[in-house]
Amino acid sequence: MQRNRITGDILRLLRKEKGLTQEKFAIKAKIDPKYLGVVENGYSSLTLTKFWGICDALDIKGSEFMKKVEDYQNKIY
């Protein structure tokens, strides 16, 4: 699904802006590193619990994260 891919792209971008590897970020977000890779590649969507953990690890509000996803989606369509 296209939205999963866009969400993964934004997640990867924000994680890299923080200078974190997938493994270090996964520890900080309290998720499995393999799951993080699956999400970043757009093969799975996030549960709300994992979404909030990721937002906390990025130090970003959920609404800010979703705004970035929406803006990116509007840019490519």
Image: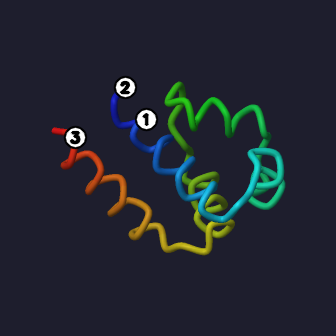
Q: Residue at x 50, y 36 (%)?
A: 45
Gap between marks 3 and 2 measured at Cα: 15 Å
N-term-proximal mark, 3 vs 2: 2
Image mark for residue 59: none
Tell me the quarter of the picture where residue 47 sits.
Answer: top right
Q: Amino acid at mark 1?
A: Asn
Q: Are marks 3 and 1 in contact (CB under 8 Å)?
A: no
The spot of residue 56 in percent (x, y) is: 64, 69
Q: Are marks 1 and 2 in contact (CB under 8 Å)?
A: yes
Image mark for residue 4: 1
The spot of residue 37 in percent (x, y) is: 67, 34
Q: Amino acid at mark 2?
A: Met
Of marks 3 and 1, the one in the foreground: 3
Residue that numbered label 3 is attached to: 76
The spot of residue 25 in percent (x, y) is: 75, 55
Image mark for residue 1: 2
Q: Residues within 10 Å of mark 3 (few under 14, many from 20)?
A: few
The spot of residue 19 in percent (x, y) is: 70, 61
Of residues 32 and 9, the one nearer the viewer is: 9
- Give the left or right position of residue 49, taking residue 20 as reference: left
N-term-proximal mark, 3 vs 1: 1
Figure quadrant of the N terminus:
top left
- Secondary structure at badge 3 equals helix
42 in relation to 53, above or below: above
Gap between marks 3 and 1 measured at Cα: 14 Å
Q: Residue furthest left?
A: 77
